[in-house]
Structure formats: structure tokens, C-alpha cells
Image: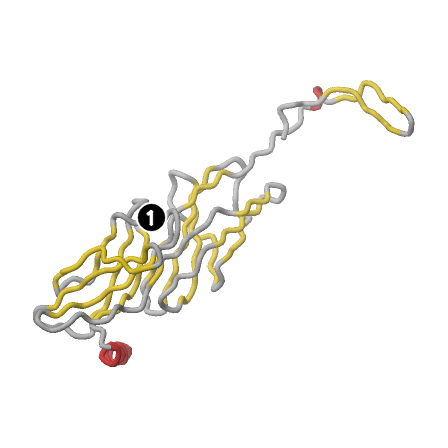
Amino acid sequence: MLLLAANQAFAQSGRYAEISSVSVDTMSERRVTIKWDVAEVVNGQSFAVYHWENDKWVRVVDSLPANMREFQDVKAHPFEHAERYAVSTSIAGDHNAPLSDAHQTVFLRSGDYDKCYNLLTLNWSAYVGTDVASYTVLGRKIGQPYSYFGSTADTTLTTTELEEGTDYNFMVVATLQNGLKSLSNIISYTTFKYIQVRRELVSIDTVFNHQGKIELRGQIDTATN
């Protein structure tokens, strides 16, 4: 029923293809994968992918064959900002269909870290183009597998499950209403490590009371933070 409804919507709009998801390839800082659904396969049909640049649509590839349902943009910058795409269908000897609705990647921003309480608050841009069922935050100590840090329907999450003085990677996975998933870029974060005071290096040697002001002179452990 959902596919039938989608096909009817495509036909009414004059479009033959609609993007189903865009996702960042987390193994590369310069690659985004765009996937689309096709309402009708027509002889001589081909696809074009468009990228939003400088307030206008720019075609990044055209003449993709009729059996294609996926394209990787290797010139994207998803680790710097969210990336937006649309697709269009061309039919030989006929016409170019209107652009599909735009879809946009999730962009994970640098975290807000409270070192006093070891709290890290992550926030990200919403996935644009279709409804999102939930966002899941995954994190890992660098060199180890990713693990679950929490899920939310919002675009922010705070975690306390961090170790002091540790290097972390974080990413967000948007689960879309159509069942597909969109991965965000990855950010790195190093938590704060407290250095304990060496008591033998802390002392008050002299106290001055001068014109209502108290001045303490002594030594401190300069290695602490």
C-alpha cells in the first residue's frame, strides 16, 4: 500500500523518482550516498543527481542508467556542513521530470563539554526530507567498536558515560520512517583528566593583614588543574 501511494504521488507530481535517504560514508570525509525509489521504469530512462550549492541546484551527475538506485558523491563536505540533494529523471525523446523533494544529511556539531561534571551534550541538525522515527547516538573509545549512548526524538543528547582523559568518536544514526537509516559525520572528543594535588607541595607560609586585605603567601602544586 505504501509503494502504491508513493507511485500515485509520483505520477501526480510528474516525477518518476524520489530520494529515499542520504547518508554520510563514515569511512571517508568526502563521500555521501544518495538512494532513491522509482515509481515507473520507462525505456530510455536515466537519472540525474543535483546538489545544492550557493543557493542553487547544481547537477553533479547525469545519464545514470535506469537500473541505478544509488549514487555516491565523492566531492561532498559532510564533515563541514549538512549536504542537500535532489534527483530528476530524463526520458529519451520526451522530457525531463521535475526535481524530487530535497533530502539533507544529519550534521553532528562539536559537543558542549562540562569538565566539572564530566557531561557531554551533543547536538545535530535534523534530517531533512522525510520524517525521522528516532536519532541514536553511538560512541567509542578510539580504536574500539561503537556502542550505544542513547536515543531521542530530539536533536540533542547529554551523556555522562565517559571516562576522564579518554579520546572518543561520536556519530548519530537517524532512523527514517521509511525504515532506512542515515549516518552523520563523526566528531572526535577528548575528555578532561584531573591531576590530583600533591599535598607536600601545598602550604601557606605567611599571612599578611594589610589595610583590611588578607594576603596569603606559600606554594602550590602547579601540575594540578
Give SS at disc 1: loop
Q: Residue at x 29, y 60 (%)?
A: 57
Q: Residue at x 35, y 66 (%)?
A: 129
In the depicted structure, whether residue 67 falls above or below residue 160: below
Residue 114 sits in which quadrant?
Answer: top right
In the depicted structure, whether residue 197 falls above or below residue 32: above
From the viewer's perspective, tell me whether residue 67 is left or right of residue 114: left
What is the basis of the colouring in this image? Answer: secondary structure
Q: Nearer the viewer, residue 105 or 115?
A: 105
- Rendered location of residue 206, percent (x, y): 83, 19
Q: Quadrant of the N terminus?
A: bottom left
From the viewer's perspective, tell me whether residue 8 is left or right of residue 66: right
- Rendered location of residue 76, percent (x, y): 30, 49
Q: Nearer the viewer, residue 92 or 192?
A: 92
Q: Amino acid at mark 1?
A: His
Q: Dot 1, crowdedness within 10 Å: few (<14), some or many (≥20)?
A: some
Q: Nearer the viewer, residue 166 or 108?
A: 108
From the viewer's perspective, tell me whether residue 77 is left or right of residue 108: left
- Rendered location of residue 152, percent (x, y): 48, 61
User: Mark 1 = which residue?
Assistant: 77
Q: Residue at x 39, y 56 (%)?
A: 106
Q: Quadrant of the C terminus?
A: top right
In the depicted structure, whether residue 35 falls above or below residue 140: below
Q: Nearer the viewer, residue 88 or 168?
A: 88
- Rendered location of residue 121, percent (x, y): 53, 50
